[in-house]
Image (cartoon, coloured by chain):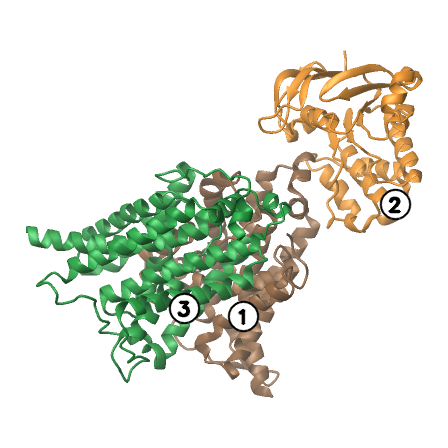
Chain colours: A green, B brown, C orange
Amino acid sequence: MELAGLLSYLVFFLTMAGIYGILALGLNVQWGYTGQINIGVAAFFAVGAYTSAILTTAPSPDHLGGFGLPFLIGILGGMLIAGLLALIVGLITQNLRTDYLAIASIGIAEIVRLFLKNEGWLTNGVRGIPSIPKPLSGLLDNGDALLYLLIILAFVALIYLGMQRLFHSPWVRVLRAIRANEEAVHAAGKNVLRFRVEAFVVGSMIMGIGGALYAHFTTFISPGAFDPMFGTFLVWVMLIAGGSGNNRGALLGAVVIWAVWSGTEMFTSQLPEAFVTRASALRIFLIGLLLEIILITRPQGLLPEKPPKLRHGDEDQASS
Amino acid sequence: MPEILQIVVYGIVLGCIISLGAIGVSLIFGILRFAHFAHGDLMTVGAYFALFGVAVIGLPMPIVFPLAMIACALVAAGIDRILYRPLRRASPIIMLISSVGTALMLRSLVQILWGPDNKIYQAGIELPISLLGLKIKPTQVTIVLGALALVVLLHLFLHRTKMGKAMRALSDNMDLARISGINTERVIFWTWVIAAMLAAAGGIFLGMDTRLNPIMGWRILLPVFAAAILGGIGSFYGAIVGGLVIGIVQELSTLFLSPAYKPAVAFAIMVVMLIVRPRGIFGGKE
Amino acid sequence: MSLLLVENITGGYGGTDILHGVSLQVEPGEIVSIIGPNGAGKSTAMKAVFGLIAIRKGMVKFKNQVITGLRPDLVVRRGICYVPQEHNVFPSLTVQENLEMGAFVRNDDISGEIGQVFELFPPLKDKRKVPAGNLSGGQRQMVAMGRALMLKPELLLLDEPSAGLSPLFIDLIFERVQEINNLGVGILMVEQNAKQALTFSHRGYILVMGCNRYEDTAENLLANQEVAEMFLGG
């Protein structure tokens, strides 16, 4: 493989890893910080992507659009709508055990999927939304991909730093305490539920950002791109592999698992046509197997989390 | 009016299939206290074991049916032994995540072996027969009667056999069961066997009624969970009622909603239940 | 040879020790009570004997065989049965089924033992088919004890059998305990109702903060002025 090809693959690789890293960071707020299982990541991912696409694309008879808003507004929109969806889900399930949230989240994922597929007036159904504008395109000759990678990395850095700040804030200390011992925090009279909903919403908003960034990267989205395998399960394996509760772990997991996933694809794409679908199923099998092995042998992931200590007065500071 | 009754009939057929899955989910939740996300794919596995028997070995379905149930039971027992048992001391949440991974593996294994395309047990179109003025396919009659028979057998098992009573005891209070000297691992083994056998039956019925494909079980997981929650998770009878209700309401919803949104109906019912009465109709386990 | 010999056991939940070198014994045919203030470790000691709590140091011997750290379902097979204080019946199972579960490890005919339980606890006779969760507190306690008797244990561990019962029932339960003892079953009992428990016991141990404090015949303990003031409510 010649150098230019290798470099361009690397840029592609890092861009996708970055997007997945953002999704993993979002999931980390939900699972890592508050132990909430969201098996509907794909829903928020998709909602972010579609919102941004609708807001930024040119007018089209096939789908809602024509607002032609700038890239950043698209990202913002994606984030907010994802957050709104999360707020609804979170409020409905706030009093329930995590099992129920997990089940509800697959329900949400299913509804979003059906909605995107069937409400053609909005989304153009399975045919998808094409020609999503790429920011800064044309600025550099042949540099589009690289520029976009830089944009992604900027977002990753921003979100990571934001999450790190948050991680050491009183708000998150309370969240982690909730995850460790909900009754104790409850007994302290703190509004556990409110914190959990907030965490769920923040995490989903980050996923929405990831979705929006994805849309502008691929410039074409359709419901199939947000299949649970790519939109949800892969993110979970990334977070578990990297280390839950841990932002660095989330990013590391994203890179590692994306490498495994792409690596196996390079391998199977060499196979003859007849084996391709079976091979992709094999890759999924291996990812599932990897998850099981990690859960049994090293559930804390590559980078075990270092819990921050809950200090007196945290709860009061957090709710102010 | 006959049109509505007709739809209700289809709903009952679908409801029987959902119930068979929901009973298993409830049994597992009652004893191991976690939501088994691989249950739908267990149904898929059962359906495909039957396909193997019918299409590859060439045996008739009545013989293949129980064999597929047993094969599926062995798979489930194996999964529990290898994947879930080591995690039992961890929280039920970790077991839930593990079951998501298991679901992936089962589904993709089926796809590797059989490919992604739809398959059927038997070629040809089945003509519906007329029963009490309503149309119903012979297969569907088999499904309803078969589900009924399985439910009755399960009831007898739970109330007339020592192991069945032990399962109910564990579901009530696992610690007390241990203290009484009950071999909890053996009871857990039998729980998986029963749950998987019912799941396999449900999967085969689903394949008979519609068609087989690798994601058939994952698709029905949401209605299965909804049924279990509706009836009261952990409650055997609740799962039956829940399944029938979900099935019937899902079918009736086609009167005013696009059929594409049927799964959303199950979800909506579940959400309403969770808000209004989370413990379900029959007040399941906490 | 003592029926039960507990030598200097130290242990507790997780990392913290609740028991600090507790010793006691039960001779065949005895009723022995463990009393003491709240948090003394009485229930903990009993759970440690039964294998529910890790013992870091010390030894437990049953009929001269070491059973320290043996799993509960194996301890049961040696001849010791345990009745916990709370959640001691299977609520959705009938009285009859609760008893059957008690005899799970047996494969022989248990009708004799079932009959015996109903002889000991006549109020349960017409409640055979009633789910245990629907019974009153006193009746549930009877079912709990009956369940433990199904394996014909040589030693019965009772954790606060009188807890939450009305005074009438408390007397009844202690009388039943005596009946069971008359059948040849050794009894080790943890009790909050110290005075009454001692009245029905042969010997007693007083634990305070996980340590032995007093040990004597029940008679002597009851007659002891100091003990009466501190532990028996004057």
For the image, the number of numbered tags is 3
Residue A232 visible, this orientation: yes
Q: Are marks 3 and 2 in contact (CB under 8 Å)?
A: no
* Amino acid at circle 1: Ala
How far across and how far down the image is residue B279, in percent?
65, 59
Distance of mark 1 from mark 2, alpha carbons?
Answer: 48 Å
SS assignment at label 3: helix
Residue A186 picture location, percent across and down = 61, 48
With B114 as the anchor, is C130 left or right in this view?
A: right
Which amino acid lies under the numbered mark 2 shown in the image of this protein? Lys
Marks 1 and 3 sit apart, C-alpha to C-alpha, by: 21 Å
| Residue C125, label in figure | 2
Q: CA distance from mark 3 to mark 2?
A: 64 Å
Corner quadrant of residue C166: top right
- In the displayed structure image, the side of residue A2 where residue B127 appears, left or right: right
Q: Which mark is residue A81?
A: 3
The residue at which mark 1 appears reads as: B268
Q: Is residue C55 above or below residue A72?
A: above
For residue B120, which quarter of the picture?
bottom left
Q: Residue at x 53, y 38 (%)?
A: B89
Q: Quadrant of the N terminus of chain C?
A: top right
Kind of element beneath mark 2: helix
Name the chain letter of the residue that bears numbered label 3: A
Do the residues at pointers 1 and 2 share their chain?
A: no
Q: Secondary structure at mark 1?
A: helix
Q: Chain of mark 1?
A: B
